[in-house]
Image: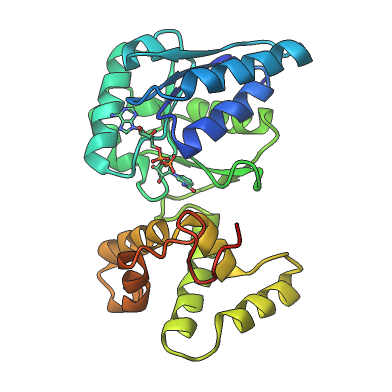
Amino acid sequence: MGNDIKIIAMIGGGYMGKAITAKASDYGYTVRLYDIKLEGLDKLAKRLNKQKQKKEIPGEITIHESISEAVADADLVIEAVPERLELKKEIFSQIDKAAPPHAIIATNSSSIPVSKIEGAVERKDKVLNIHFYSVMLHPMADIMRGSITSDETFEKGKKWIESIEFFPLVVKKECLGFVFNRVWRAVKKECLKIWAEGNADIEIVDKAWQLWTGMGFGPFKAMDGVGLDVVYDIEMSYYNESGDPKDKPPQALKDMVDRGELGMKTGQGFYPIKK
Ligand code: NAD
């Protein structure tokens, strides 16, 4: 386990919250999980606690009915609620009021720098962006400071990421998209343009990517996995920030989202999804 962090509070137990909980659980952390919807979380806790017992891994997974209860003895709180600034501010404020003074508060947001959330808390030196990718596939997480995050907080966060055998992608100076989201975004944006402007077929682009990188799938297949609604929202958040018409995602992508062609989750995206 990393440094003096032993207890994690996970606020939001959706796709990312569950995956982060499972990963931290495997590495000996106690995780206190809170979500407004509790369905299915007991089952998850039972399964993870059983695994812990079997493998003699320390710590426990507990489910809570309020934020104040979940964060009461936490050393690190990770927020993974939906990507809405006002909601994240409200959650940060509730966490700040109830968590012990030493606790670090991190957001898993895909696009909101923690500097835009930190106004909601007193402990502005103890906030971080810790942004995970697909937890099962990509053992890495971006880590970025707020306006006055202390070196101590940053180092603790970095060591915690390393303690679960993930690679910390250190952002030295605040930017939109952290480290790898920015790289992935550049690829994604050009691929979408090639497709929407009719320059080449998606199969050709994906094949080129596979031959170049040696990966098993290309960007269009990856976007189907992420969900085209999520891809569209993220592209729109970059566009809203820059106001540059070149950043606006193609209308053809919006049309797919409106038709419910969201990728893997609906069975049809850029490719038909085999069940
Ligand atoms: P999700 O919709 O699967 O999960 C969000 C969870 O938050 C839901 O279970 C919901 O019930 C819960 N929630 C809503 N309001 C709440 C509240 N007031 N208090 C407590 N819980 C509440 O979303 P997700 O994909 O897990 O994304 C969560 C965050 O992680 C977002 O900020 C997203 O940008 C970020 N993220 C997502 C991905 C991804 O691939 N999906 C990757 C990296 C980061």
- Residue occupying image coordinates x 63% and y 20%: 48
Residue 170 found in image quarter: top right
Residue 148 found in image quarter: top left
- Residue occupying image coordinates x 32% and y 41%: 115
Q: Farthest residue in the bottom direction?
A: 199
Q: Is residue 91 visible?
A: yes
Q: Position of residue 88 (x, y in %)?
A: 29, 35
- Residue occupying image coordinates x 45% and y 14%: 63
Q: Position of residue 178 (x, y in %)?
A: 48, 52
Against 12, residue 99 (above or below) is above
Against 203, residue 100 (above or below) is above
Which image quarter holds the N terminus? top right
Q: Position of residue 44 (x, y in %)?
A: 55, 23
Q: Is residue 69 left or right of residue 152?
A: left
- Residue occupying image coordinates x 60% and y 57%: 275
The image shows a total of numbered marks equal to 0
Q: Quadrant of ligand 1?
A: top left
Give 8 or 172, whichever is nearer the viewer. Answer: 8
Q: Position of residue 258 (x, y in %)?
A: 30, 66
Q: Is residue 3 visible?
A: no
Q: Is residue 255 left or right of residue 191?
A: left
Which color scheme is applied? rainbow
Against 53, residue 170 (above or below) is below
Give 39 or 9, whichever is nearer the viewer. Answer: 39
Q: Is residue 244 left or right of residue 109?
A: left
Give 261 or 96, whichever is nearer the viewer. Answer: 261
